[in-house]
Image: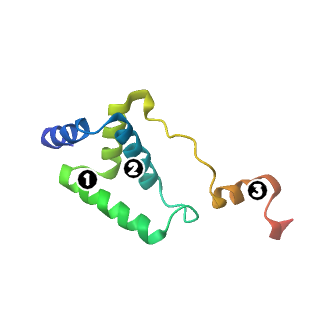
Amino acid sequence: MDDRSTLALDAWLGGLSREARRELYVLLDELVSGLDVSRHNRFGFLRLRAEFETSGELFGCSLEQLKDAVAETLGADAVKPPRPRSPLEALRDRVRRRGHPDFR
């Protein structure tokens, strides 16, 4: 990211409360890490990702750089809060522990 982009991003993030930046970080982390179809509506997820990519283009940075910039403003608070496992995650854990039902 160039200096101009960094200044614009810092000014924008400076106007957000700590809680808003934390929520933004969690959302960006989810967008960057991919889609769990059991947790999101695919169309809504892709639309939201496109909105954030547009924001990144305005600041001259990628989604990952935007996420990292938000994390820098949070320091140690840039930890994702625990969330309940999705049905897909629960199924993956069950298959990992007991094996796939088709191959028992």
Q: Residue at x 17, y 44 (%)?
A: 5
Q: Is residue 85 above or below residue 4?
A: below
**Residue type for callout 1:** Gly
| CA distance separating discs 3 and 2 | 28 Å
Q: Earlier in the sequence, mark 2 or mark 1?
A: 2
Mark 3 sits on what residue? 94
- Res. 96 image quadrant: bottom right
Q: Is 75 left or right of 104, judged from the image as shown?
A: left
Name the residue type under label 2: Leu
Q: Quadrant of residue 8?
A: top left
- Distance in Å between CA atoms under marks 1 and 3: 38 Å
Q: Earlier in the sequence, mark 3 or mark 2?
A: 2
> Where is residue 29 drawn, in percent x and y?
43, 48
Q: Amino acid at mark 3?
A: Arg
Mark 3 burial class by Cα count in 10 Å: few <14, some 14-19, many 20+: few
Answer left or right for 10 relative to 86: left
Q: Which residue is mark 1?
A: 56
Percent position (x, y) of residue 3?
Answer: 14, 38
Q: Position of residue 17 (x, y in %)?
A: 31, 36
Query: Residue at horizontal 12%, vertical 41%?
Result: 4
Residue beneath the point at 69% across and 56% down:
90
Quadrant in which the C terminus is drawn: bottom right
Q: Are marks 3 and 2 in contact (CB under 8 Å)?
A: no
Residue, disc 2? 28
The quarter holding residue 2 reads top left
Q: The residue tagged with tag 3: helix, strand or loop? A: helix
Q: In terms of secondary structure, where does tag 2 sit?
A: helix
Whether residue 12 sits left or right of residue 79 in the image: it is: left
Q: Quadrant of the N terminus?
A: top left
